[in-house]
């Protein structure tokens, strides 16, 4: 029987192997190159935020990797001063939460470590307003410093645009949560059809899938 292939989606596999952790076997691998999507649920809409790019997130070179999907409520973290910059010990209970911390005054890894000690399972650090040349989407990747070798949880950096959205949602009384989600692919290839007339065969343009070799 003559079989005409109607369409088949090709998979373009991008190897995303990271070798930085090999340089220091005692250090955590960090959240760089983990290929996850940060899904921010503001209570009224859900935003999928990816690493880098236009209004994406910055990664940490220290701390834990994202090896499985997990979700949790988000909460502002305050240290003993009290301040959400969190350069001092955090005494509030952040058990099972994704802590929200502001940038400034000390190493990124100090902030994440104190949140981890308070029970947080991940940390989101929000950009400050100190540099007027920065936009709402300006991000930074986060290098380790003090306590970096003690951090075991993942952390990311978001531009102040998302900080404003998170704060507005919380001020409105919405429960804000987030997921560190790993993309999944289902039915990537379409089934072919029997005896389809050539005139009916068409090409699908601008349709692709990018996979990261984890």
Image (cartoon, rainbow, N blue to C red):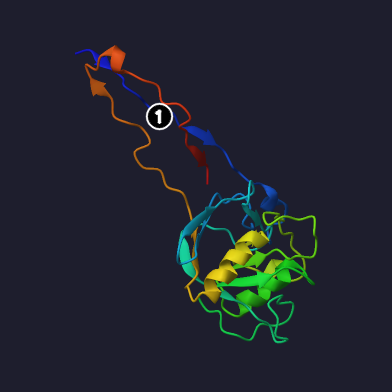
Image quarter of residue 107: bottom right
Question: Is 200 in front, or is 187?
Answer: 200
Residue drawn 31% across the image and 21% down it: 6
Q: Is residue 68 visible?
A: no
Q: Quadrant of the N terminus?
A: top left
Question: Is 10 in front, or is 105?
Answer: 105
Residue 141 at x, y percent in the picture = 71, 55
Vertical placement of residue 182 versus 167, above or below: above
Residue drawn 71% across the image and 68% down it: 109
Residue 31 at x, y percent in the picture = 61, 57
Q: Is residue 123 visible?
A: yes
Residue drawn 52% across the image and 42% down it: 213
- Left or right: where 131 falls relative to 173: right
Residue underneath mark 1? 9
Q: Residue furthest left?
A: 1
Total numbered labels placed on residues in the image: 1
Vertical placement of residue 106 versus 139, above or below: below
Residue 39 at x, y percent in the picture = 50, 58
Question: Is 212 in front, or is 24?
Answer: 212
- Left or right: where 23 falls relative to 154: right
């Amino acid at each position: 029987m003559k079989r005409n292939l109607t369409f088949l989606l090709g998979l373009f596999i991008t190897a995303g192997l990271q070798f930085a952790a090999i340089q220091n076997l005692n250090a955590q691998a960090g959240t760089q190159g983990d290929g996850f999507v940060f899904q921010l649920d503001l209570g009224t809409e859900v935003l999928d935020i990816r690493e880098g790019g236009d209004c994406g997130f910055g990664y940490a070179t220290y701390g834990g990797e994202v090896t499985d999907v997990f979700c949790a409520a988000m909460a502002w973290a305050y240290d003993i001063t009290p301040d959400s910059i969190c350069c001092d010990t955090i005494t509030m209970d952040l058990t099972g939460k994704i802590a929200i911390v502001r940038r400034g005054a000390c190493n990124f890894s100090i902030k994440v470590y104190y949140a981890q000690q308070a029970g947080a399972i991940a940390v989101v650090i929000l950009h400050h307003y100190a540099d007027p040349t920065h936009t709402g989407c300006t991000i930074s990747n986060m290098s380790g410093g003090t306590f970096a070798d003690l951090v075991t949880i993942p952390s990311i950096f978001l531009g102040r645009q998302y900080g404003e959205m998170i704060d507005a949602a919380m001020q409105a009384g919405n429960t804000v949560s987030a997921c560190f989600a790993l993309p999944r692919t289902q039915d990537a290839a379409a089934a072919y059809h029997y005896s389809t007339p050539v005139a009916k065969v068409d090409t699908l343009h601008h349709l692709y899938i990018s996979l990261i070799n984890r």
